[in-house]
Image (cartoon, helix red, strand yellow):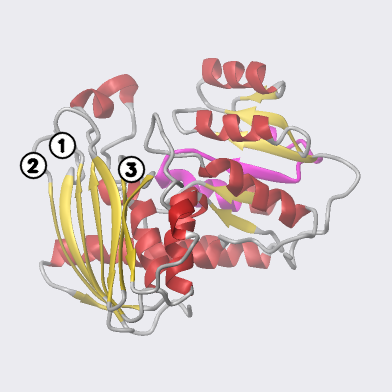
Amino acid sequence: MSKFIKPVTGRKIRLGFVGCGRISQKHFEALEQHKDNIEVVAVCDEVEARATQAATRMGAKAYFSLDSMLEDKTLDVVTIATPNGLHPQHVMQVANSGVHVITEKPMSIKLADGMKMNQHCIDKNVQLFVIHQNRFNDTVLALHNAVTEGRFGKIYMITSNVFWTRPQDYYDKDGTWHGTKDMDGGAYLTQASHYVDLMQWIAGSKPKSVYANLKTLARKIETEDSGVASFEWENGIIGAMNVTMLTYPRNLEGSVTVLGEKGTARVGGVAMNVIEHWEFADIRPEDEAILKANYDTTSVYGFGHVRYYENVINVFRGKAKPLIDGIEGLKSLKILTAIYDSSEAGRPVVFGEGINF
């Protein structure tokens, strides 16, 4: 349950959508599958052609500014899918209207902004949802369940590789915001933030330290296209993460590996869609079915958006609590910003008192 949301019954949840670019298509696909419970009544984009096209697809009204869209006082919730650097402004703008808000990852580029967003929504009695849809993939759920059930015993190490490709055209076309410090933030924030979230979710502990080295090796951009980072959590787990957008000639791997005293598992494929290794001291009958949890994907986004919105629906129906709220979003953002701080300073970042989680 959400203390901010009065249950919506007897009608569809009325949703507005802001930012009709690349990622919006995954949202629209998911929302179309939930059309019996969610009605997309408004879409907004400053590029009129994109807003109009999205409105036609979703049977919604097109707006070209968020202010004008928020004049619709029947909205229950608004999804923010604008460039990363605009998330704080747009989230707080929606909250000021008393409308609940869903924001794409990362919730912001700067930790201070993320904390302000979360507190602002609390002050306005608005529920903040943060999208980390990969947590809902069958392969990821199997891995996390194995952790919570203690099948690994003591976990020693968690590693992740994000070996994808983003050609120069991706950063250059149509005056895009990608690769800019103020709007994109970098490969870790934009492409790899899901994997940072999964690593900290699996570790189940406060971070102790981060040491990172980020580089712009090939692309002509303001941010990093590659990097390495090492982690230590307070519960003793250590880890490492390798990220590059320079993989030739296509996306190669998005993986998380967990190594423990009684188990080893690796979920990989191009986007955590394949269980590549699954071995535990306690062999269980369900392991055979888990190994069949693999799925095909044509993109790095996976299919978690459908289940993500299912949780949103259940929260609005008064049947569930938000699984990924502002506090959950801040957990990975704290680590992400430390990665950038460490690389810039050329030394480890050791966490002190901060977010209470």
Q: Circle 2 sits in a helix, a strand or a loop, which is it?
A: loop
**Residue drawn where x is 59% and y is 30% of the image:** 28
Classed neighbour count for the residue bearing mark 2: other residues with Cα under 10 Å, few (<14), some (14–19), many (≥20): some
Q: In which quarter of the view is residue 2 placed?
A: bottom right
Q: Any magenta on residue 73?
A: yes
Q: Give the alpha-carbon distance from disc 3 to disc 2, as whole Å.
A: 17 Å
Q: Position of residue 329 (x, y in %)?
A: 48, 61
Q: Position of residue 143 (x, y in %)?
A: 42, 61
Q: Quadrant of the N terminus?
A: bottom right
* Residue topped by disc 3: 184
Q: Give the alpha-carbon distance from disc 2 to disc 1, as whole Å.
A: 9 Å
**Residue drawn where x is 52% and y is 26% of the image:** 46
Instruction: Give the camera-side residue of 7 and 172.
Output: 7
* Residue topped by disc 1: 246
Above or below, 227 against 70 in this view is below
Residue range corresponding to the magenta coloring: 69-92
Q: Which mark is residue 217?
A: 2
Q: Nearer the viewer, mark 3 or mark 1?
A: 1
Q: Seen in the image, is 294 located left or right of residue 234? A: right
